[in-house]
Image (cartoon, grey):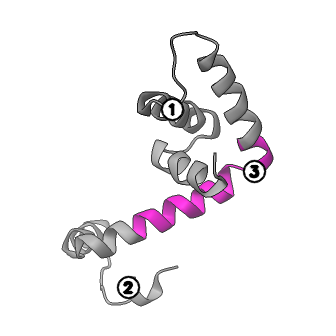
Amino acid sequence: MHRDILGKFHYNTLSEWQQAMKAMPREAYGRLEWQANAFAGHLLMPTDELRSSFAAILAKITAHPRVDPNDDWVRELIEKQLADIFGTSSMTAHIRLEREGL
């Protein structure tokens, strides 16, 4: 994955790899991170389990009458809880939900 970008860097140690990542242009690094999160989401968050977990969490949160399911904090809370369930980052959960249209 990302052979075209990572192939331009030469490193033999963890320290050299860390320096190479710091030297990478911000836009390229951001693209790599997004793709890594998207891949992790597909691998670690199967669609059926993701959908049922999302529905259960949303139902629990919105059972409270003063909660607007469209508020940003609700979305962030759902992403955090899904990340905990599936052992991913909140960003991975965010990307996965976007891709599933949830």
First in residue order: circle 3 vs circle 2: 2
User: Residue 39 lies in magenta, yes or no?
Assistant: yes
Quadrant of image for the C terminus = top right
Q: Residue furthest top?
A: 65
Label 2 sits on a secondary structure element that is: helix
Q: Amino acid at mark 2?
A: Ile
Residue annotated with mark 3? 47
Vertical arrangement, residue 46 with respect to residue 30, above or below: above
Label 1 sits on a secondary structure element that is: loop
Q: Marks 3 and 1, how far apart in space?
A: 22 Å
Q: Marks 3 and 2, how far apart in space?
A: 30 Å
Vertical arrangement, residue 60 with respect to residue 81, above or below: above
Q: Residue at x 75, y 51 (%)?
A: 47
Question: Where does the image place residue 95, in percent across and percent down from the top left?
Answer: 53, 54
Q: Amino acid at mark 3?
A: Thr
Mark 3, Cα crowd under 10 Å, few <14 / some 14-19 / many 20+, is some
Vertical arrangement, residue 61 with respect to residue 87, above or below: above
Observer-nearest residue: 18 or 14?
Answer: 18
Label 3 sits on a secondary structure element that is: helix
- Residue 33: mark in rendering: none
- Residue 70: mark in rendering: 1
Left or right of residue 58: residue 19:
left
Question: Where does the image place residue 13, in percent across and percent down from the top left?
Answer: 31, 72
Predominant secondary structure, magenta span = helix
Residue stretch in magenta: 32-50
Q: Marks 2 and 1, how far apart in space?
A: 38 Å
Q: Residue furthest right?
A: 48
Question: Where does the image place residue 49, in percent across and percent down from the top left?
Answer: 77, 42
Residue annotated with mark 2? 5
Task: State the image quarter where residue 81 is shown.
Answer: top right
